[in-house]
Image (cartoon, helix red, strand yellow):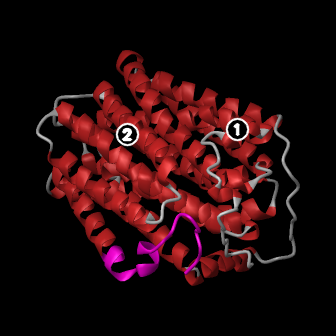
Amino acid sequence: MSASRVAVSDADPLVAAPTRFGALKYAPFRRFWLGSIAAVGAFNLNQLAQGVLVYDLTGSALDLGTLGLATAAPTIMVTLFGGVLADRIDRRKLLMGTQVALAGLLALLATLVVIDVIQVWHVYTIAFFTGLATGLDWPTRNAMFPSLLDDKSQMMSAVALSSILWQGSRIIVPTTGGFIIAAFGPSLTFYIAAAAFMVMFATLITLKMPVIQKQPGRNPLKEFTEGIAFIARTRLFAILIPLTFANMFFGMIYMQLMPAYVDLFGGGPREIGFIFTGVGIGAVTGTFVVGKYQQVERLGWMILSGAFAFAVMIFLFALSPVYWLSIVLALVAGFFNSTYMISSMTVLQIRVPDGLRGRVMGIYTITFSLIALGGFFGGVIADFTSVRVAIATGSVILALIVIFVAITQPQIRSLDGRSLVED
């Protein structure tokens, strides 16, 4: 059996329905996962507070999009080679460095707010450098957690737990952050996020990692090209990764433009927090549900229908006439997006060879930067039309892409969760 091909028989442990939390029985993974609660919360707090701060300073949806561009552009540039670094050097030390850098940058931003000298260009500049650090952090984090498992039959559990971490954070953090910002302003939120990154740093100090076989004599550009070549020649990767890019770029515009969207209802930080909490509740629910049905025969159709239903819910969200309905639609959208993301990412994590994991998953990690970059696309549209039109436009484009993939890619339609076999 080749490294890029994982055939799973009925006796294979992947089909033995590992428990949803089975990966936590491995102490290194458990410690990493618990420490990541702080870091993931910090990422979400920073996203919320930076958006509120920029909108308070400018009142412009276009400036919210520009904030997304300032964050996403450096993240994408660094992420492309962050995966190469994750395959070449000590992942633990690399991740420790990103935690310190992110903590320092957010502490600086908080201090600028406290001493009342903050200007929008300050926010953009710090967002740029946090983007650089994030470009190293995300691919390293994605490449690191599978190596903390002794048994790859727990990979689905690890992916689901990773999603629960991110989506569960959105249940608590945005609402809490919204109340903190409303009561004390964004500076305290930035300080809390900085402290949370240092908690992750302290966790990493105590973490023991398996030794990675290093190949210092190899050309980093050649290694990166190898990751691209693997994606190009492996049909599931060649389709699912670009589809996930489209999902985030076009479907998640609403996240970057949220301060402007809730302003349509006269809302502020608390109202932003409630909608993000709705998204988080839906996503966590979707994570648990998809865990039960991930090994069904029609996994491909579940992936495609999840992406399409997500696009439909976001379209309705864009046109919602009342705030409470927006929360409900955001919750349902989070549910369907989670079914797509968990199913597709599990397939990719199982199928990627260990020697290419950092590079391939590093490229996949660009996914999360495209939320902010899509926000810039949406901000430009909103500047000429409206926030509602911007969000709706993205959802329609995403729905058309999903339909195109469903019609033209039988390899995805026929994907069988019981075997996860390459066509």
The foreground one among 235 and 211 is: 235
The kind of secondary structure element at disc 1 is helix
Q: Is residue 231 magenta?
A: no
Q: Which quarter of the figure has residue 98? A: top right
**Above or below: residue 314 compared with residue 1:** above
Tell me if I can see residue 237 in this picture: yes
Q: Which residues are magenta?
A: 404-423
Q: Amino acid at mark 1?
A: Leu
The foreground one among 274 and 264 is: 274
The foreground one among 26 and 252 is: 26
Q: Residue furthest top?
A: 183
Residue 6 position within the rendered picture, expressed as x and y whole percent measured from the top left: 67, 71
- Tell me the residue at 22%/28% (across/down): 267
Q: Local crowd at mark 2 within 10 Å, few (<14), some, or many (≥20)? A: many
- Tell me the residue at 62%/29% (across/down): 196
Q: Which mark is residue 416?
A: none
Q: Residue furthest front?
A: 10
**Above or below: residue 162 compared with residue 193:** below
* 121 left or right, relative to 198: left
The quadrant of the rendering that contains the N terminus is: bottom right
Q: Is residue 415 magenta?
A: yes
- Tell me the residue at 70%/49% (across/down): 145
Look at mark 2 in the image and give the residue it sits on: 282
Look at mark 1 in the image and give the residue it sits on: 24
